[in-house]
């Protein structure tokens, strides 16, 4: 029996209320654990932040951007030419992220973020001889070794730190340039997701998702943390793979592989993006009719470039990860209670993706269930490959497009849950899981009355940024 719109809206609200209850319980239980046992190592659980109501120079701009996107975003997303939409999405996302960052002021919100004791810029001087430092990198991961790396450097493969070393080498020195890099590159993630959704599902759903990708609460942590930069690299790896498997040209596969290899050397945990890549291949399996073997070879060859380069330079990824696990349990990761964080991490995810994403995920799940129950669920429409010169791709039926998008966000949620269950993501996931959050946000395309949901997204982001001083 088909659900009525009223029943769907009621189910959406119940899902949002359940998510809000999860956040509330995480706050209350977290406060009790932290006040009693001091084992969470966050001041405002479940978020790594301090209670600090404030306004700043970015406040007027943030309010203006939020109001403009709520009022005009859905309409413009439908009317703008596709390339114009991509440019507008990136520009608006940049304005939103910069304004939120500047709510904390230039030093606290941008320039000082990546210069704190555990951050990447503190070790720039140790990379004066890059090849020698890469050969010696794993000797300083575990606490107790001579000159151990600060937490974030030890916790990531060296491509993360090397990014900021190279920025320094070309004259873009200091926290201001590093923060600007993370915000500028990180804001392109919304464009990458739009490109992928259009290729794998259809343009209509991509356009519906656009305002939600722009106005995401996740922007609070994209400006400015290195994980926003990581999120963009991972997002473009998926987007280029989507272009490759949907007939836009097999050459995109090489770029997808290259960026996936870089993703793995920016953050160990982002190897889980292989699951999202596999979902893209599944969605495109009936559309790869031209040179599938060439596509596979280009993908593998591209993915090998960064690992081979770092291995030849002397860095052993597997050894680095093994030592990281030791370092993780030497520090607060070994003290933070798994029994709290395994579900409180999900409360952090609610905060970075917002209530609209919760409702969208509920609708995505309903779409997949309906697809499985439908008598025609096993029938996959035949879709001709789309030439790269075509301005608008041919697309499957609306119902099939919805199922494809639901499948993509469901696999993303699975990857996030695996990261959660691993126990290597206890706390700070509002930052660490930014790359996954970007691929949950497209679920908002399933929602009716987008302005109502966008208002909720904007209010959450503004409250978070003005009531809390986030650690990243």
Image: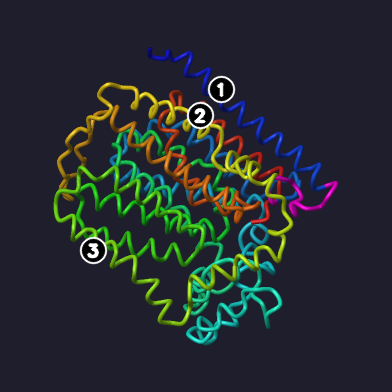
- Magenta residues span 35-48
Q: Position of residue 35 (x, y in %)?
A: 84, 47
At 34% from the left edge and 34% from the top edge, which residue is drawn?
Answer: 205
* Mark 3 neighbour density, 10 Å: few (under 14) some (14–19) many (20 or more): some
Q: Which residue is mark 1?
A: 13
* Mark 2 neighbour density, 10 Å: few (under 14) some (14–19) many (20 or more): many
- Residue 185 in the magenta stretch? The answer is no
Disc 2 secondary structure class: helix
The main secondary structure of the magenta stretch is: loop
- First of labels 2, 3 by sequence position: 3
- First of labels 1, 3 by sequence position: 1
At 51% from the left edge and 87% from the top edge, which residue is drawn?
Answer: 132
Q: Position of residue 165 (x, y in %)?
A: 52, 76
Of circles 2 and 3, which is in front? 3
Q: Do labels 2 and 1 touch, CB within 8 Å?
A: yes
Q: Position of residue 118 (x, y in %)?
A: 67, 67
Is residue 85 depicted above or below 13 in this figure? below
- First of labels 2, 1 by sequence position: 1
- The circle drawn on residue 249 is none
Q: Which residue is mark 3?
A: 297
Disc 1 secondary structure class: helix
Distance, label 2 to label 3, CA atoms, is 39 Å
Distance, label 2 to label 1, CA atoms, is 7 Å
Q: Position of residue 37 (x, y in %)?
A: 83, 50
| Quadrant in which residue 379 is drawn | top left
Distance, label 1 to label 3, CA atoms, is 47 Å
All told, the count of numbered labels is 3
* Mark 1 neighbour density, 10 Å: few (under 14) some (14–19) many (20 or more): some
Relative placement, left or right, of 32 versus 20 is right
- 220 or 267: which is nearer to us? 267
At 48% from the left edge and 14% from the top edge, which residue is drawn?
Answer: 7
Q: Which residue is mark 2?
A: 359
């Amino acid at each position: 029996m088909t659900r009525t719109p009223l029943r769907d809206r009621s189910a959406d609200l119940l899902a949002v209320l359940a998510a809000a209850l999860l956040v509330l319980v995480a706050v209350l239980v977290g406060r009790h654990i932290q006040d009693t046992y001091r084992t969470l190592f966050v001041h405002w659980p479940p978020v790594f932040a301090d209670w600090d109501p404030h306004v700043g120079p970015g406040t007027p701009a943030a309010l203006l951007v939020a109001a403009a996107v709520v009022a005009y975003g859905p309409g413009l997303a439908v009317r703008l030419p596709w390339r114009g939409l991509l440019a507008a999405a990136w520009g608006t996302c940049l304005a939103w992220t910069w304004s939120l960052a500047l709510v904390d002021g230039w030093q606290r919100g941008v320039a000082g973020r990546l210069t704190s004791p555990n951050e990447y810029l503190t070790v720039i001087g140790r990379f004066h001889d890059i090849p020698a430092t890469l050969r010696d990198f794993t000797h300083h991961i575990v606490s107790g070794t001579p000159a151990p790396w600060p937490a974030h450097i030890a916790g990531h493969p060296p491509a993360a730190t090397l990014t900021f070393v190279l920025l320094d080498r070309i004259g873009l020195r200091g926290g201001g340039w590093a923060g600007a890099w993370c915000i500028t590159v990180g804001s392109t993630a919304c464009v990458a997701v739009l490109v992928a959704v259009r290729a794998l599902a259809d343009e209509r759903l991509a356009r519906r998702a656009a305002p939600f990708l722009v106005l995401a609460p996740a922007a609070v942590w994209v400006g400015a943390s290195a994980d926003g930069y990581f999120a963009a690299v991972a997002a473009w790896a998926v987007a280029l793979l989507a272009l490759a498997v949907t007939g836009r040209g097999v050459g995109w596969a090489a770029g997808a592989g290259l960026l996936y290899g870089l993703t793995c050397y920016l953050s160990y945990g982002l190897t889980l993006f292989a699951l999202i890549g596999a979902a893209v291949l599944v969605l495109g399996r009936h559309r790869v009719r031209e040179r599938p073997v060439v596509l596979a070879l280009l993908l593998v060859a591209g993915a090998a470039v960064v690992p081979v380069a770092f291995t030849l330079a002397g860095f052993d990824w597997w050894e680095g990860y093994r030592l990281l696990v030791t370092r993780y349990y030497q520090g607060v990761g070994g003290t933070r209670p798994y029994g709290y964080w395994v579900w409180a991490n999900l409360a952090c995810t609610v905060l970075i993706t917002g209530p609209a994403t919760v409702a969208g995920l509920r609708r995505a799940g309903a779409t997949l269930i309906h697809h499985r129950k439908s008598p025609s669920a096993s029938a996959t429409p035949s879709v001709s490959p789309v030439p790269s010169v075509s301005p608008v791709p041919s697309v499957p039926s609306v119902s099939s497009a919805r199922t494809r998008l639901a499948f993509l966000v469901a696999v993303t949620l699975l990857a996030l849950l695996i990261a959660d269950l691993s126990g290597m993501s206890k706390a700070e996931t509002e930052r660490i899981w930014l790359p996954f959050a970007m691929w949950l946000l497209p679920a908002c395309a399933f929602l009716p009355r987008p302005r109502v949901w966008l208002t909720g997204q904007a209010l959450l982001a503004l409250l978070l940024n003005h009531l809390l001083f986030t650690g990243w």
